[in-house]
């Protein structure tokens, strides 16, 4: 049995998370001294992620006994997406060009190739780690990780159904998924603090991104005002009415597709991920936010709409952080080793591609998270560069749902060959 954390009351856990966020923002606002130097190396967003992970690792809190991530991802994330897209310039988004898509697919190819290569490398060092027969075959279990890292939870479930991995061993694969994916996110957040140096090394042209950020910032400056209580209430109404509509629409669409089209109800189908209510919730919320950007509600950016959305995003980051137990890295070193090699190949593919096409680090980081993290974390990473860029993360994550099952099946076939089965 797992140890019960010290705090299981979500009110207390939420208080601890807010304490962590308050500490990070207080110390990162210092203009001189130790903290100024510290945050020059470690991005504040990374600390918002790591401190809850430390709380989890010390046994103070545990995601398995908390509903906070569910609340943050289902309520605060869609609300944040609405508030952050109010001032979006859709034309400028399209002007970002094809590099975003190229980097996304480079990340996908890195996952597809990385799986079998990781198996080959580890089999040469520790053959027993990649063994197993029948339902216990490691390659079958790794198929679920491929589904998660290219598409998301729905694609992961599809792989478990298709390749019939032993359910009693499935927890080990979930462990690898969580540990390695969270380490990747921590690395990407660390890189955000070094964006200029990385872009210089990549010889990247980030003029389109800079232009988009400047457009949004200039617009916000032109409509800036001291927000009143009615302003805050209207912004919250826009956000959470949209959340309600998104949930209602997502439930209706998911039930309709599952009830009327067998292909969407079949967990072995590549289209089964489109019956995911989470996918439709994020899609609807983003669409409504974009729609509102063509109305007078756009002026609420001047009252701090994207700042309010950023608060929700930071709370989401903290709840994602509490999923990470740093001690789990040592629980199953063989499988973790496969995952780390696999993810390293994914990252190498991204950097090589970015270097070749001179893509900025923004596209690399968001392209990676759109694959590995999906719609829950791709907007978080995108918004870390600038709130106006959150929509890019959502749009790329949609491609993950589209190609997830197909990409995972191809990865699994290659892993099966690599394992000699």
Image: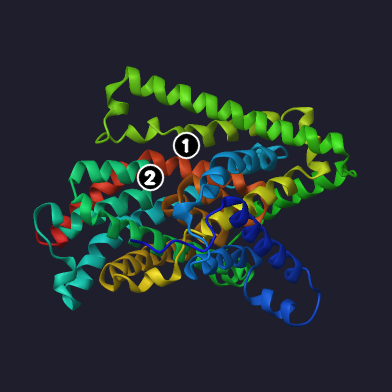
Rendered position, 207 above or below 252: below
Q: Position of residue 407 (x, y in %)?
A: 30, 47
Camera-side residue: 160 or 147? 160
Label 1: which secondary element: helix
Camera-side residue: 109 or 69? 69
Label 2: which secondary element: helix
Rendered position, 119 above or below 12: below
Q: Residue furthest top?
A: 260
Rendered position, 59 above or below 136: below
Q: CB of mark 1 within 8 Å of CB of mark 2?
A: yes
Q: Position of residue 165 (x, y in %)?
A: 19, 50
Residue placed under numbered mark 1 in the picture: 278
Residue placed under numbered mark 2 in the picture: 153
Q: Which class describes the residues within 10 Å of circle 1: few (<14), some (14-19), or many (20+)?
A: many
Whether residue 103 is visible? no
Camera-side residue: 278 or 271? 278
């Amino acid at each position: 049995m797992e140890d019960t954390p010290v705090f299981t009351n979500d009110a207390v856990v939420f208080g601890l998370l807010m304490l962590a966020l308050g500490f990070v923002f207080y110390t990162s606002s210092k203009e001189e001294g130790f903290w100024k130097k510290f945050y020059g190396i470690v991005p504040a967003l990374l600390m918002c992620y790591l401190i809850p992970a430390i709380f989890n690792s010390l046994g103070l809190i545990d995601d398995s006994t908390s509903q906070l991530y569910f609340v943050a991802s289902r309520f605060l994330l869609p609300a944040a997406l609405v508030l952050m897209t109010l001032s979006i310039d859709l034309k400028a988004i399209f002007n970002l060009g094809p590099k975003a898509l190229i980097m996304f697919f480079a990340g996908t190819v890195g996952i597809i190739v990385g799986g079998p290569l990781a198996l080959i490398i580890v089999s040469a060092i520790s053959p027993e780690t990649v063994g197993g027969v029948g339902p216990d075959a490691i390659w079958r279990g790794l198929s679920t990780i491929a589904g998660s890292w290219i598409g998301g939870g729905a694609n992961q479930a599809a792989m478990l159904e298709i390749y019939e991995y032993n359910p009693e061993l499935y927890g080990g694969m979930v462990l690898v998924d969580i540990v390695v994916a969270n380490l990747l996110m921590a690395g990407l957040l660390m890189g955000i603090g070094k964006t200029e140096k990385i872009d210089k090394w990549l010889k990247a042209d980030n003029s389109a991104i800079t232009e988009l950020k400047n457009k949004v910032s200039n617009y916000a400056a032109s409509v800036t005002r001291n927000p009143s209580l009615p302003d805050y209430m209207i912004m919250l109404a826009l956000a959470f009415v949209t959340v309600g509509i998104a949930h209602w629409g997502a439930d209706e669409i998911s039930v309709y597709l599952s009830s009327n089209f067998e292909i969407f109800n079949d967990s072995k189908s590549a289209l089964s991920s489109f019956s995911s209510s989470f996918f439709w919730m994020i899609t609807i919320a983003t669409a409504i936010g974009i729609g509102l950007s063509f109305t007078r509600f756009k002026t609420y950016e001047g009252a701090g709409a994207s700042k309010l959305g950023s608060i929700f995003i930071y709370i989401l980051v903290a709840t994602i952080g509490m999923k990470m137990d740093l001690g789990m890295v040592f629980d199953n070193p063989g499988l973790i080793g496969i995952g780390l090699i696999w993810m390293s190949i994914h990252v190498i593919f991204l950097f090589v591609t970015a270097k070749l096409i001179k893509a900025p680090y923004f596209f690399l980081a968001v392209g990676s998270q759109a694959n590995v993290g999906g719609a829950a974390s791709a907007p978080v990473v995108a918004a870390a560069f600038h709130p106006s860029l959150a929509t890019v993360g959502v749009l790329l994550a949609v491609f993950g749902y589209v190609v997830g099952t197909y990409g995972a099946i191809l990865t699994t076939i290659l892993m099966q060959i690599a394992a000699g089965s």
